[in-house]
Image (cartoon, grey):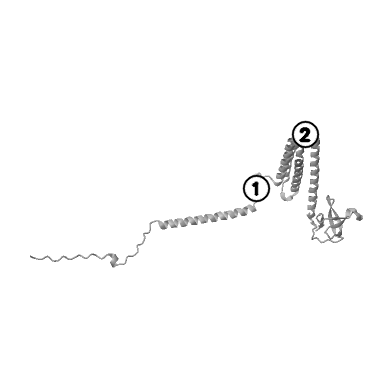
Amino acid sequence: MSTQPPRRRRRRPQSTSESDPQMPRRRKKRSGSSGKKKKSSKKNQIMLLRIGLFAAAGIVLLIGIFMMDWKGIGKSLGLPSAQERLLNRVIAIKEEQADLLASIRDEASARSAGESMKDLTVQIAETMQEANDLRKDKSQKVTPEEDRELRDRFMSLNKDLDARIKQETERIMKNPSLRPIMAEVFQDARFALMEAQSEMRKKSLQAGASAPGYSAVTSWTSLSPGDDIQALHMNVNWQSGKVVEVADDGKVKVHLNIHSGINSFDQFYERDKLRIKD
């Protein structure tokens, strides 16, 4: 009997892990990832560009605000001028006066109206003075036509209010029990008005110490006897004179030219009531 040849064992092929060292796997690049990065970068650039443009526009706007002629813009938009606002304020105060008089029906309301009537009367005088000063201000650049139109409109409104105030006053004064009380209220308001007008006139004249061609006398102004000077005489007008004496407290004794050679009229003035020529 013939013997079969022994079977040969097949060798298993060596794994790659045994033959070669395993290399780290590389991640596959996803398609489109680089495109997204580019798009994101482009968006950021556009956003930065827009921010820069907005910032530049903001700077230009700020500069334009300070360079614009707001007075001209106000006229084109129909905004009231400074003088018109003051005159409208006068009308509003007089309306308050008319309403106050209309509210007076008995002795208690008449007595309580006293202080309010004084305050409103003084407010009207002060506002009118401010409006008149503003009207004289050449920097306002109000044309004669605008000034006339504004004055005519104000006078029309004021006329209607005066008629209403007169009507209410006549109604009140017909009441025998209210007549003496209101007479006192009106008298107090009149005295308050006179005092306010005197103070405003004084301030206006004192402001004239710095009028063109003159300089106000201050605590630093050096004065000597014989110097030419002007003094606010009786708080009414400026009168020329000469320095007679400078007191230790800073007051200045002045001889006014209107008193000729009468030295008995010489008097000391506070420095805020004196001015000298430039």
Q: Nearer the viewer, residue 125 or 19?
A: 19
Residue at x 29% of width, y 65% of height: 17
Q: Which secondary structure, mark 1?
A: helix
Of the residues shown, which amino acid type is indicated by label 2? Ile
Give percent across and percent down for residue 193: 79, 43
Residue 151 is drawn in which quadrant?
A: top right
Is residue 165 shown to the viewer in this render?
A: no
Q: Which secondary structure, mark 2?
A: helix
Is residue 96 shown to the viewer in this render?
A: yes
Residue furthest front in the image: 108
Give percent across and percent down for residue 34: 41, 58
Residue identified by numbered label 1: 73
Residue identified by numbered label 2: 172
Give percent across and percent down for residue 112: 75, 39
Task: Specify the label residue 222 is tagged with.
Answer: none
Using residue 41 as the reference point, say whether residue 69 is left or right of it.
Answer: right
